[in-house]
Image (spheres, rainbow, N blue to C red):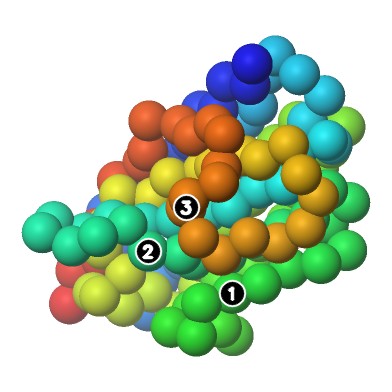
């Protein structure tokens, strides 16, 4: 079992930045691929970014490329999502998900664990 806890969300003006954290406990964090997903009201959950076990491979949704950066610190058991140049359309609940297989995975299906989410609101 892996427990994931997201933090770092909040209210920010358009053009601002936030850094989300995903703290993991329960198992060796370095054995889990991590993905960030988001869900806006009335919409389906969508892929944002993903990172492999070592952090050597990453993937991003087209909508966030060049603005968001995913990273991880396995020693701290934490993954991060640095979000810059935020736009109102980035407003959503952001979820961290973990999967026991190495790689980068862009669909929520197949992830084994996820957190409770953290709200990000970007005002115009």
41 lies left or right of 98: left
Q: Quadrant of the N terminus?
A: top right
Coordinates of residue 101 in the picture (x, y in percent): 76, 44
Q: Earlier in the sequence, mark 1 or mark 2?
A: 2
| Image vertical order of residue 2 relative to residue 6, above or below | above
SS label for mark 2: strand
- The residue at the point 77 percent across, 58 percent down is 103
Give residue 94's mark.
Answer: none
Give the labeled residue for mark 1: 60
Coordinates of residue 22 in the picture (x, y in percent): 58, 38
Q: CA distance from mark 1 to mark 2?
A: 11 Å
Residue pushed farthest front?
110
Give the labeled residue for mark 3: 108
The crowd level at tag 2 (other Cα within 10 Å; few <14, some 14-19, many 20+) is: some
5 lies left or right of 76: left
Q: Earlier in the sequence, mark 2 or mark 3?
A: 2
Give the labeled residue for mark 2: 46
- The residue at the point 73 percent across, 37 percent down is 100
- The residue at the point 30 percent across, 49 percent down is 93
Q: Are marks 3 and 1 in contact (CB under 8 Å)?
A: no
The crowd level at tag 1 (other Cα within 10 Å; few <14, some 14-19, many 20+) is: many
Q: Earlier in the sequence, mark 3 or mark 1?
A: 1
């Amino acid at each position: 079992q892996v427990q994931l806890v997201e933090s770092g969300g909040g209210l920010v003006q358009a053009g601002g930045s936030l850094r989300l954290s995903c703290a993991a406990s329960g198992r060796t964090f370095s054995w889990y691929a991590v993905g960030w997903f988001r869900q806006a009201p009335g919409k389906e959950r969508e892929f944002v970014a993903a990172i492999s076990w070592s952090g050597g491979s990453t993937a991003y949704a087209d909508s966030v490329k060049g603005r968001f950066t995913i990273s991880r610190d396995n020693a701290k058991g934490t993954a991060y999502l640095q979000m810059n140049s935020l736009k109102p359309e980035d407003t959503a609940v952001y979820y961290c998900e973990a999967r026991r297989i190495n790689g980068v995975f862009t669909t929520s299906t197949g992830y084994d664990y996820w957190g409770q989410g953290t709200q990000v609101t970007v005002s115009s």
